[in-house]
Amino acid sequence: MPKTLRLILGDQLNSAHSWLQHTNDEATYLMLEIMQEQEYVMHNVQKILAFFGAMRNFAHHLTKAGHRVIYLNLDDQGNEQDLEKNIKKIIKKEKIELFEYQLPDEYRLDEQLKDICKGLNINTGVADTEHFLTERMEVHDFFGGKKRYLMENFYRHMRSKNHILMHGDEPEGDRWNFDADNRNKYDGKVPLQDALRFDHDVSSLKKMIDKMGVKYFGGFDEEHLPWPLSRQEALKVLEYFCEHLLPHFGTYEDAMLQEHSSLFHSRISFAQNVKLISPAEIVGKVISHYQSNKNKISLAQVEGYIRQVIGWREFMRGVYWAHMPGYDQKNFFGHKTEIPHWFWDGKTKMNCLNKCITQSLDEAWAHHIQRLMVIGNFALLAGIDPDHVDAWYLGIYIDAIQWVEVTNTRGMSQFADGGIVGSKPYVASAAYINKMSDHCKHCHYNYKARHGEKACPFNSLYWNFFDRNADKLEKNPRIGMAYVTLKKMKPDEKEKTMLQAETYLNNLNEL
Ligand code: SF4
């Protein structure tokens, strides 16, 4: 083997990778904390510290296993703070003959590494990350050039292909999808359990990023970072989820409670997205736990979770690679409104948004309905520029890496792709938020009113959204009912509703 430098990015912490199964005197592993990655968007401080904490643990694990590692801390004197400059400098210093990297999951880094390799005068190579269940272009090939991708078709293909929850060719329980059983409000019938949280003291890392002038937002107790930062901790999160949360996960998957942020969600997405744990391991463990506990756990709980891991997650990655570059520029509705300032501090009288945004700032995490049906729903109804919405989501959440963020935000939540990911925009009035949460009963606004002094903004904005986008949406067969209702609305009622929406749209910062 020639003298080889192997780059491991901050979201490639996969200790099961074939590179790492044997030590080799000729291989050096390179890991970098660089300003470049802190500056492409402003991040939540927890996200920065969790990445650095997990990367340092991983480097320590590699060294302990006998691998040769070069790890540059953000404040190391010789750190050039730029991927290309650091790689070139180390290749020269170490007299490297071959440079290798693993396929990045972000288009931005993929392009940069291809460019870097073109400028090196040594051989280069690229390896798969060995993490996902699908190849980058598998979703693209599966849909064979179709304009709209239907996740359900891909999900069934994944179930069959990987023999997950199958009896021969048929789905276990004779149904592919238990989605209809996953839409309950929390009714207090089963006790709530908190997700497993850790207690990492990251105060010295925090001092380092402050010294280096890293810009960030969000705040938290830096002696108690709750996220899993090692493989062992990721496995504990999974074990805890199966034991305590999985039995009710599916039933309350879409429910929201203002005093309990995670209900029965696993909060394993950070560990999964930095590859401390693989989707195959998660699926294997969840199914084996279900099989040994069928008296306690129903199929609907398990299927709902498996659908997220082998369905949505792989599907979104496939959409990303099928449509990049360009997907991150899509703006189907031409929305141009500035993001309201209260997205950065949660200070709005709308209780659902106040609670979901404050939680996102404080915990760097929210579950999918909080992200999709409260925050994203409002952003879409209010016509916020998807560039602003993307930057906010990409920065704020602990698990946000562009491949998964942009497809969920710009695609599913904002319908800015015009319907590649979703067959219709995910918008709802206050009735949905009231049905799925306890936010409305504590709110300044009246969830039942469309217009009037304290009318809930979601209501008039909902009808205004359909009215102003009739040319783009009216013919969509999945939306027909909204336009039937809008047409039946009495002229006086419609006028008052549209006037109310206009007032709100002109005063978004005051809501
Ligand atoms: Fe949100 Fe409207 Fe309910 Fe208030 S009334 S919590 S703004 S949906």
Image: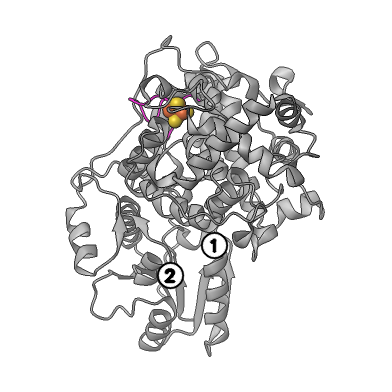
Give the residue drawn at x 57%, y 39%. Answer: 309
Residue 24's disc number = 2
In this view, 331 is above or below 80: above
258 within the magenta span: yes
Residue 353, x across and y down, in percent: 41, 36
Identify the image quadrant of residue 432: top right
Residue 463, horizontal then vertical, whole percent: 62, 34
| Above-or-below relation of 496 to 505 | above
Q: In this view of the protein, can residue 1 be seen by the observer? A: no
Decide which of 510, 255 is in the foreground and name it: 510
List x then y, in percent, for residue 204. Answer: 17, 58
What amino acid type is highlighted by mark number 1?
A: Glu
Amino acid on which disc 2 is placed: Asn
- Label placed on residue 156: none
Residue named by callout 1: 106
Indicate yes or no whether the magenta region holds residue 398: no
1 or 2: tag closer to the N-terminus: 2
Label 2 element class: loop
Q: Secondary structure at mark 1?
A: loop
Residue at the image point whose x is 58% and y is 31% from the top: 496
**Residue 482, position as x, y percentages in the image:** 71, 30
- Identify the magenta region: 254-266
